Amino acid sequence: MEFEIATIGERGQVVIPQAVRTDMSIHKGDKFMVLQRGDMLVLKKVIAPSMDDFNKMLKKGHAHAEKHNLVEKDLYDAIKKARKK
């Protein structure tokens, strides 16, 4: 597909063309991240990880924390520092 034109409704809603929804398996209730890049809007479909993938990420995070001797306070300090930026 080259491109399609979409119109913003009065409540700020955009209808994604049917061909795109079908091609990308987009369904009612799917979540999207909205990014602004200059004069462009980018919609990125957000896909939640499976429980198995989530548990793998959690184990990897715990291993990293243990390897670098990180404690819970370090996490809170990092969050505080990031929020100041």
Image (cartoon, rainbow, N blue to C red):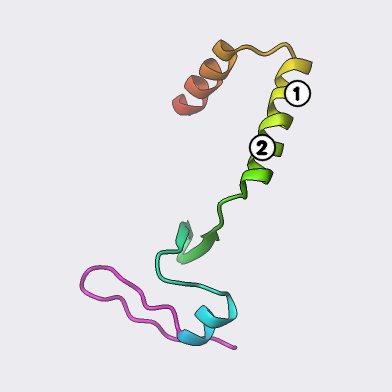
Q: Position of residue 67 (x, y in %)?
A: 79, 17
Which residue type does callout 1 highlight?
Ala
Q: Which SS class for mark 2?
A: helix
Residue drawn at x 73%, y 31% is: 60
Q: Which residue is at 75% across, 23% downward? A: 63
Viewer-side residue, 48 vs 7: 48
Q: Nearer the viewer, residue 61 or 41?
A: 61
Give the side of residue 38 with respect to residue 23, left or right: left
User: Which residue is located at x 45 percent, y 66 percent?
Assistant: 39
Q: Quadrant of the N terminus?
A: bottom right
Label 2 crowd (10 A; few <14 / some 14-19 / many >=20): few
Secondary element type, mark 1: helix
- Location of mark 2 (residue): 55
Q: Which mark is residue 63?
A: 1
What is the quadrant of residue 72 in the picture? top right
12 sits left or right of 83 in the view: left
Q: What's the magenta region?
A: 1-17
The residue type indicated by label 2 comes to Asn
The residue lying at 59 percent from left, 88 percent from top is 2
In the image, 38: left or right of 54? left
